[in-house]
Image: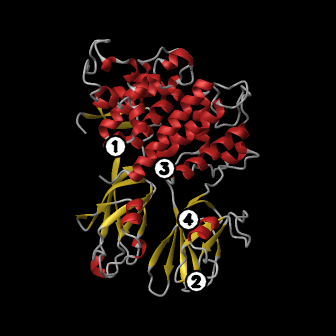
Amino acid sequence: MPYATPISLADLRERLADRWEGVPFWDVDDANDALNETLLWWNLMTGVWRRRETIPLAKLAMDYALSSSLTYPLRVELNGRPLTPGTIFSLDYTRPGWRGWQTDTGGDVPRRVETWAPVSLMEIVVVPKPIVDADLGTLVIDGVCDTPQLALDTDLLELDEGWLVPLLNFSLHLAAYKLGGPRWRTTIPFRTDFFAAAAEQNIALQRSQLFRTYAGLDLGKLQRPRGGQGQDAPGAPAGSGEGSDAAAQPADQEQG
Amino acid sequence: MAFRGTDVLSKLQGRLIEPRDGGASWPSELWTPQEVHRYLHEQQVRVLRETGCLISIAWLGLTVPGTTVVDLPEDCLQVVRIGWQRTTDLKHFEIPPADLFEADMARSGWITESQSFPIAYSIGEADDVPNQRGDLNRLRLIGSCTDPGIIEVWYVALPAPLADQGNPVLDAIAAADILTVPDVAMPAVLWGTLEQQTAKVARGADQPRASYAREMRTIAIESIQIILRGWEA
């Protein structure tokens, strides 16, 4: 996290206040709510606030609950050896009967714990079940922790300076929802910027077509060669070819 | 960390230019405390059901050979997956969902034939009359099995109600108003509730903001789903 500096809630609020006119519509609670909700969205999309947790591996146990402060896991190690990440879907469709697998099952079943997969945000499975003492050890789980929520003006948040502008602008956008109308609509592009910044941090978001649309990343129509003649590069002067067709604009422009 | 219902209600009040008091009053009279409280609970149920972000696992006990109907856990909101484990050799089988019509089409003799493990399961068709809606809390195993085994159910549990919906103010203050969803899922609940409020067919109806709240909810749901399916390359 380069250039990360602790920043207090009061400082964040002051910088947010720079972005609006201090009329009575806005109060401290509005600003705090918008900032804290922004942090929730950021952690949901990027998993940036992380923590490590250790859980002892138990004989014949496949399911492990994470503590309430670890919202979801990102990687799992067993005795210093990284386990292969999977999903329940892939286990079901590639390894039928995996719920009954044990390290002594034999055949194609691995003889040591090899794979982990998320059951839900707060539970994982490891496959196969350990059966002998030699298989046991400690699971080390690197996961996303609860999102920091700032309550006191002196509460500090460690934040990359480069994220500050999209985060503050998104907070402004959330807070402006109460206004509705043109003043709120003016801030809608800030949401697009925020989602694009999140997609930079988390490549998994870019695989979702829905997310790419809202983040203004669905530029396929602009980038694909279309018809040979008169092909414009994105950003070329309007009317110089097919690429400047208005229909090929990013889909997010009409959001909201 | 999970959020308190009263805190989320205060956030909603802030978004809708109402004084913040934990959802105890809505002076605009566009909504009542009870209905907003119910919206919030409904949205929690919706988020849990759509994302499966919290799954409970239960073992339904030993089934003797020939068992075809089993009660599901009382708090079962949605079944995610059913497995059956033979007790003699601990071999595990995933049991797919089907209805009785599908079973008839796939294997016409399934009622009289027996096999070592169930071939499918059906919910809501536990009565003896095929294709009549039965008890939704009962699971019917399709195919009479000859071996003893236990049934494993992965399910989404119904969240605890935030408070007595007849008197949300007192109950919320009395505690027990913690949201069931993890904190990262709170935006989906918040925006779903905002959608419900701004889409109410009443003086407060606000189509642009309702549509926008729906978009935000959709994005939050998608983000949770990405987490749950996004580990593999």
Q: Amino acid at mark 1?
A: Val
- Residue A98, position as x, y percentages in the image: 39, 71
Residue tagged 1: A48
State the separation of the CA atoms marked 2 and 3.
49 Å
Tag 3 residue = B1
Alpha carbon distance from label 1 to label 2: 53 Å
Q: Nearer the viewer, mark 1 or mark 2?
A: 2
Question: Which class describes the residues within 10 Å of circle 1: few (<14), some (14-19), or many (20+)?
Answer: some
Relative to A57, B137 lies left or right? right
Where B120 sits versus B159, above or below? below
Q: Do the residues bearing badges 1 and 2 touch, measured as CB atoms within 8 Å?
A: no
Label 3 vs label 4, nearer the camera: 4
Classify B115 as above or below A5.
below
Q: CA distance from mark 2 to mark 4?
A: 18 Å
Question: Mark 1 belongs to which subunit?
Answer: A
Q: Nearer the viewer, residue A18 or B142?
A: B142
Q: Secondary structure at mark 4?
A: loop
In the rendered view, does A128 fall on the left or right side of B148?
left
Check disc 4 and report the residue beneath it. B97
How many residues crowd around disc 3 within 10 Å: few (fewer than 14), some, or many (20 or more)? Answer: some
User: Disc 3 marks which amino acid?
Assistant: Met
Q: Of the residues shown, which amino acid type is indicated by label 4?
A: Pro
Q: Secondary structure at mark 1?
A: loop
Indicate which disc, 3 or 4, sits on the residue closer to the N terminus: 3
Query: In the displayed structure, does residue B18 sit left or right of residue B119?
Result: right
Residue found at x 73% / y 40%: B34
Q: CA distance from mark 3 to mark 4?
A: 35 Å
Q: Is residue B75 above or below residue A183?
A: below
Residue on which disc 2 sits: B114
